[in-house]
Amino acid sequence: MIILGIDPGIAILGFAFLSKDGGKINILEYGVLRTEKDESEEKRLMILFDSLNALINKYKPAEISVESLYFTNNQKTAFQVGQARGVVLLAAAKNDVEVYSYNPNEIKIAVSGYGRAGKKEIQEMVKRILNLKEVPKPDDAADAIACALCHIFSRKIKVKA
């Protein structure tokens, strides 16, 4: 099974494709999608959508795990993150892939066992869990990997009636 983890953002969107085969978890690809500040918002969102859609078509994930929007003091940033999440949801719907959302505390608990773990602690746990030689960079990509791991570890299973 292939899981796509997403750390949404309009300037930098982190992504990670992880495969789970039995008890083994492997990274297929991770990185970031970047948009330029001087581009219009609509063009930036289109760039994210087109790039994400191409990645989804390449790896064909079974499910997508995305960090949910959390409230911040900067309303502009929160709004832009919300727009980026919307792009993720649209790309998922276009490709008929189920989306699961996790808040930052759920991700921290699933990866480190502690809801108040710092960024460095989460990155170190990602490195350990996946037996990597170094912490994945940039931070947004490491966050996307953590989001995918959260989904794998605490997979929300829908019960069909």
Image (tube, rainbow, N blue to C red):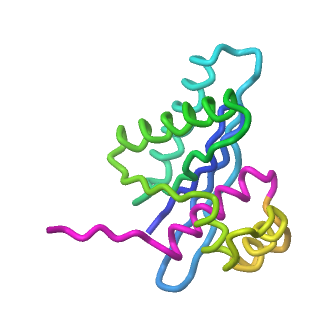
Locate residue 1, reporting x and y percent: 44, 69
- Nearer to me, 130 or 41: 41
**Number of marks in the rendered image:** 0
Locate residue 113, reporting x and y percent: 67, 79
Locate residue 48, reporting x and y percent: 58, 32
Seen at 49% across and 54% down, the residue is: 59
Seen at 41% across and 44% down, the residue is: 92
Seen at 57% across and 17% down, the residue is: 42
Q: 40 above or below 119?
A: above
- Nearer to me, 51 or 81: 81
Residue ranking furthest to the left: 161
Residue 125 image-quadrant placement: bottom right
Q: 2 above or below 88?
A: below
Left/right of residue 90 with respect to residue 42 in the rendered view: left
Locate residue 36, reporting x and y percent: 75, 23
**Residue 90 is inside the magenta segment:** no
Residue ranking furthest to the front: 73
Magenta-highlighted stretch: main secondary structure? helix
> Which segment did they paint magenta?
137-161
The C terminus sits in image quarter: bottom left
Left/right of residue 37 with respect to residue 52 in the rendered view: right
Left/right of residue 39 with respect to residue 2 in the rendered view: right
Q: 154 above or below 66?
A: below
